[in-house]
Image (tube, rainbow, N blue to C red):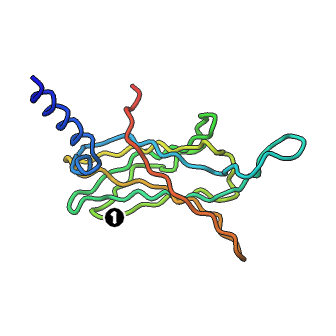
C-alpha cells in the first residue's frame, strides 16, 4: 500500500512539473495575461497618502511555438483593474504561422487599465499543437539613467460558459 501511494505521489509531482507541462498539446485555450498600465512604488506621501505612480507601456507577444502548425488567435480582450472591457485588439481572427509572433501594444500614455489590468487571449488550431507562449514586456525608458522593465506571463484558465 505504501509503495502504491509513493508511486501515485511521484506521478502527481512529475505531472505538475513545468518540464512535463511543456510537452502538453492542445487544440485551443483561453489565456489570462496580467498587465499593468502603471505601477505603484515608493512610500505613501502627501495629503492623500498615495505612493508614487509610474506609467508603463505594454508589449504583448503571442508566440507560436509549433514548428509545423499555425494557430488562430480569435480574441485579445483588454480589461481594466475594475474588470471593464476596454478594447478588443483583434477585429477579426488572425493566423500565426509556425514559429511566428504577433504583437499587441498598449501605449504608455494609456493609463486607463490601471495596476490590475489584464488580457484574455483565446486561440485554437485545426490539430493539437504546442500552446503559444504569451508574455507582456512592460517598459518605461526615458533619457538619462531612468529605466523600468519587467515581464508577465499568461496562464491558461477555464473559459466561462
Residue sitting farthest toward the front: 2
Closest to the observer, 46 or 1 = 1
Q: Position of residue 79 (x, y in %)?
A: 57, 41
Left of 28 or right of it: where is 14?
A: left
Q: Residue at x 10, y 28 (%)?
A: 4
Q: How many marks?
A: 1
Residue sitting farthest toward the bottom: 144
Left of 73 or right of it: where is 59?
A: right
Q: Quadrant of residue 54?
A: bottom right
Residue topped by disc 1:
100
- On screen, 116 above or below 150? above
State which quarter of the image contains the C terminus. top left
Q: Residue at x 30, y 45 (%)?
A: 124
Q: Residue at x 54, y 43 (%)?
A: 118
The local crowd at label 1, few if under 14, some if 14 to 19, many if 20 or more residues have their Cα within 10 Å, is: some
Closest to the observer, 123 or 158 = 158
- On screen, 144 above or below 57? below
Residue sitting farthest toward the top: 1
Closest to the observer, 125 or 4 = 4
Q: Position of residue 12 (x, y in %)?
A: 21, 35
Q: Position of residue 96 (x, y in %)?
A: 34, 59
Left of 34 or right of it: where is 2?
A: left
Q: Position of residue 58 (x, y in %)?
A: 57, 57
Q: Residue at x 37, y 59 (%)?
A: 63
Element at badge 1? loop
- On screen, 1 above or below 56? above
State which quarter of the image contains the N terminus. top left
Left of 23 or right of it: where is 43?
A: right
Amino acid at each position: 500500500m505504501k509503495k502504491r501511494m509513493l508511486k501515485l505521489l511521484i506521478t502527481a509531482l512529475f505531472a505538475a512539473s513545468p518540464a512535463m507541462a511543456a510537452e502538453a498539446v492542445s487544440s485551443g485555450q483561453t489565456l489570462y495575461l496580467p498587465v499593468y498600465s502603471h505601477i505603484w512604488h515608493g512610500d505613501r506621501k502627501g495629503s492623500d497618502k498615495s505612493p508614487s505612480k509610474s506609467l508603463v507601456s505594454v508589449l504583448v507577444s503571442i508566440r507560436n511555438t509549433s514548428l509545423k502548425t499555425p494557430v488562430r488567435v480569435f480574441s485579445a480582450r483588454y480589461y481594466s483593474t475594475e474588470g471593464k472591457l476596454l478594447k478588443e485588439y483583434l477585429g477579426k481572427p488572425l493566423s500565426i504561422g509556425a514559429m511566428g509572433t504577433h504583437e499587441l501594444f498598449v501605449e504608455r500614455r494609456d493609463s486607463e487599465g490601471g495596476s490590475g489590468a489584464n488580457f484574455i487571449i483565446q486561440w485554437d488550431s485545426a490539430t493539437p499543437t504546442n500552446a503559444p507562449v504569451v508574455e507582456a514586456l512592460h517598459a518605461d525608458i526615458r533619457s538619462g539613467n531612468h529605466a523600468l522593465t519587467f515581464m508577465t506571463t499568461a496562464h491558461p484558465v477555464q473559459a466561462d460558459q
